[in-house]
Amino acid sequence: LLSIRLARSELGGNERNKTIAASVVSLSLFMLLASAAFGFWRYRMKHNAISKNASKDEWRNDLGPQYVFEMHTIQTATNNFSLSNKLGQGGF
């Protein structure tokens, strides 16, 4: 709460001061509401981004079974990573 003490002579009939005070109060209120709206918008954007990533992960889980092999099984299947079983070579 803002309290300003003025002399009685300064309060009477000066339209310019009333206009300035009303403008300052209106502008302050507008800035407060605009910053609150911006903060709410940012919160919603972050929340939507998190939920979109979660739905993508859920979609990936529905693609089908995902297999995890033990190292021993892979070594047996590739003849201990033999060069004769090599399909390609990395690089550019």
Image (spheres, rainbow, N blue to C red):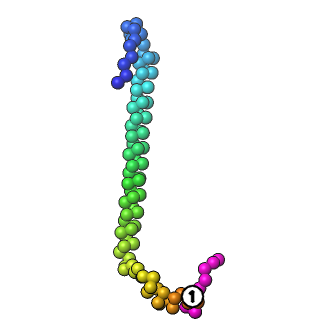
Amino acid type, callout 1: Leu
Quadrant containing the N terminus in the rendered view = top left
Residue 27: x and y, percent?
A: 43, 30
Residue at 45 percent of width and 82 percent of height: 71
Residue 13 in sight:
no
| Left or right of residue 20: residue 91 | right
Q: How many marks?
A: 1
Residue 84: x and y, percent?
A: 58, 92
Of all residues shown, which one is farthest toward the right? 92
Observer-nearest of 71 and 63: 71
Of all residues shown, which one is farthest toward the top? 9
Quarter of the image holding residue 24?
top left
Residue 68 in sight:
yes
Observer-nearest of 7 and 90: 90
- Establish if 35 lies above or below 64: above
Q: Which residue is mark 1?
A: 87
Residue 68: x and y, percent?
A: 41, 79
- Establish if 91 lies above or below 58: below
